[in-house]
Amino acid sequence: MILKTNNLCKKYQHEDGQVNALNNVSFEVNKGDFVTITGASGSGKTTLLLTLAGLIKSTSGQVQINGFDVISASDRKLSEFRKDHIGFVMQSFALIPYLTAIENVMLPLTLSKLSKDQKYKKAFNMLQLVDLENRKNHLPKELSAGQQQRVAIARALVNSPTLILADEPTGNLDPGLSSDILHLLKKINQQENITILMVTHSPLAAEFGNRKINLINGEIN
Amino acid sequence: MNIRKLVWLEFRQHKSQLISGLLAITLGIAVIVGIRSISVVSEKAVAVNLDNLGANILVLPQASNVDNYYAADIDAPTMPEEYVDRIVSSNLQGVDNLSPKLTRRTMIGNENVVLTGILPKNEVTSKPLWQQSGILGNELKASCAPDNAANKSNGFEDEKLQRKSIDSLGTNECLVGSVIATKLKLAEGNPVDILGEKFTVGRVLNETGTIDDDRIFIHLHKAQEILKIPGQVSAIEIMGCCNAISDGLLSKLRNVLPDTRVTTIGQIVATQIQTNKMMNKVSLIFLIIIIFVGGISIGNFMWANINERHKEIGMFRMIGFNKSIIYQMILAKALVLGILGGIIGYILGTLSGMWLGPELAGLPVNPIPMLVLVSLSISIGVSLIGSIIPAYLAGRIEPFNIMQED
Ligand SMILES: Nc1ncnc2c1ncn2[C@@H]1O[C@H](COP(=O)(O)OP(=O)(O)OP(=O)(O)O)[C@@H](O)[C@H]1O
Ligand SMILES: [Mg+2]
């Protein structure tokens, strides 16, 4: 077991009233799982991913990843934990516009103690994995949407994370590209045995995982 | 890829916006450096003037003024040499050295020179009356006059003081200022014709950068003779000791010599000193202005930059940069800005000082390398201070924003 949540609750305080975005969410994920998280818009999927990574403080409940207590950790500890254990893939890619593909991939290694060459080599290997080694010196704006998302995936992988959290990674891509990305994630999941939690709207995409979690109004159904 | 490189790449990316952020601080530093480099030479000029006189009290004929004295016009007023004896016999306390002078502008060949008659030391000290009153004229230091060390630290050698302690001067001997010597091609031992009289060059004085370079010194009495102004002098220079001056030495002197004008160096160089003071005040005001305006403008620039990079900073947080690394990145950028502002400001200020100096202070202005450090520390300090709040706010950017944005 790599991830375990227990009665996770997140209430957003808003002037229009309180939003119960997550309600007693409890589940476990085993190493090597590819979990897809589905649910209507506003059902709390993004909130769940962010809470798991400690990017949002939960209102109550527990989250443990690889034995690390996400809820009680300090900012410094959490940052370090994310650096070493978590890779993010987002709908909007979130590449740094002034960094080339390979520099973007190297970004999570910025703080590591690896040598310049080692960092470069690792990043290059990841670009190879996503089939973009021949675009390594391109800026994001010089890449297609699908290529940008592949760079983002390479970046999520470069620190050899325990867990990849993906929030609608194919949301901005056309069906053909989506399928490429999903196959890539599947390949990573199977070849590297990296655990993936992927939020998606698409029923088709949801089939790529080996487990499904469906959220309705912040509760697992 | 490391933090430094990351900061640098980002910096390069937004370099076109830098100008607005750096403008205030760069101009501020430039003004400070410009003013400082001019006032340094101007302060030196004061020192030169002090030194040039070698005295801090000047007794001039009633109708005269300091400008007359320096201009040494043909009809500049004079007063009797006998006044020297009057001062001596009055037994005033705090009068350390007396030096009567006769100064006239004249032509030698085609060159305009200032002919200055002086009394060599041996004659001053040999006057029995003077010895009695203990005024020996050996010591050329009044208690508040700049001593040699002070002169040296300002880059001046003792040459001008040597002139005043000229031990002996033959009646047909002359000492020639360096500029005149060059113009007239004179060397030690050469003959020179002054107003129809034959003189021999006793010595060529080292360059002083003062009006002395244009002077030819001869014996006072010889000067009176050839200028046909017997028994008259244009000025009496006095080394007065500071305490005595504040105890009213000037008015006592005025009592002894009612029909003269008695001024102190203070009054003579007052304008220059005042200008320097004003310049320093202006620098101070500018310093305060750049601390505020420069700090605010850099802070504003950083703030805009951080807002623009909200997503990016959220991204950094997400991949594991903790708050202190975000602070470091922002402050590193501020450091680069500060260094740039300091260096550019120094260069601009020095260039404008060199350009304006000759017009404002009438003196050539040289770059002052020390000011690079001052510029850098002011600029870096202001830039860092201005960036503290933006850095703090950047640290508070929560990474989840970027997951929810577009
Ligand atoms: N910062 C916030 N303050 C208040 N309410 C919020 C905030 N963020 C999200 N919510 C609310 O929490 C609920 C869950 O939001 P969340 O973004 O997790 O949904 P989602 O399942 O990811 O939706 P989508 O599929 O549209 O991305 C929503 O009802 C939303 O309005
Ligand atoms: Mg969402």
Image (cartoon, coloured by chain):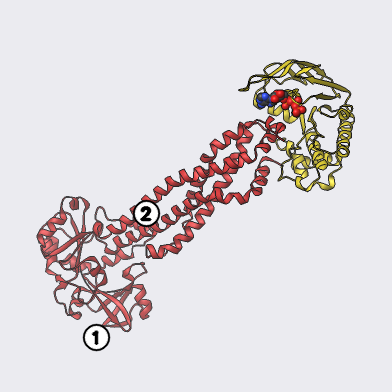
Chain colours: A yellow, B red
- Out of B210 and B167, give the one closest to the viewer: B210
> Callout 2: few (<14), some (14-19), or many (20+) C-alpha neighbours within 10 Å?
some
Label 1: which secondary element: loop
Q: Nearer the viewer, residue A103 or B182?
A: A103
Q: In the image, what residue type sits under mark 2? A: Met
> Relative to B73, is B345 above or below?
above
Q: Are marks 1 and 2 in contact (CB under 8 Å)?
A: no
Whether label 2 lies within 8 Å of ligand 1 gets the answer no
Residue B196, numbered circle: 1
**What is the distance, in whole Å, between disc 1 and disc 2 at their CAs?**
48 Å
Does residue B130 appear left or right of residue A175 in this picture?
A: left
Residue B270 position, x and y percent, is: 27, 57
Residue A120 locus on image (x, y percent) = 78, 42
Sequence-first tag of 1 and 2: 1
Q: Is residue B377 above or below residue B43?
A: above
Q: Residue at 44% of width from left, 60% of height from top? A: B353
- Image quarter (top left, top right, bottom left or bottom right) of the C terminus of chain A: top right
Q: Which residue is mark 2?
A: B279
Rendered view: B122 above or below A93: below
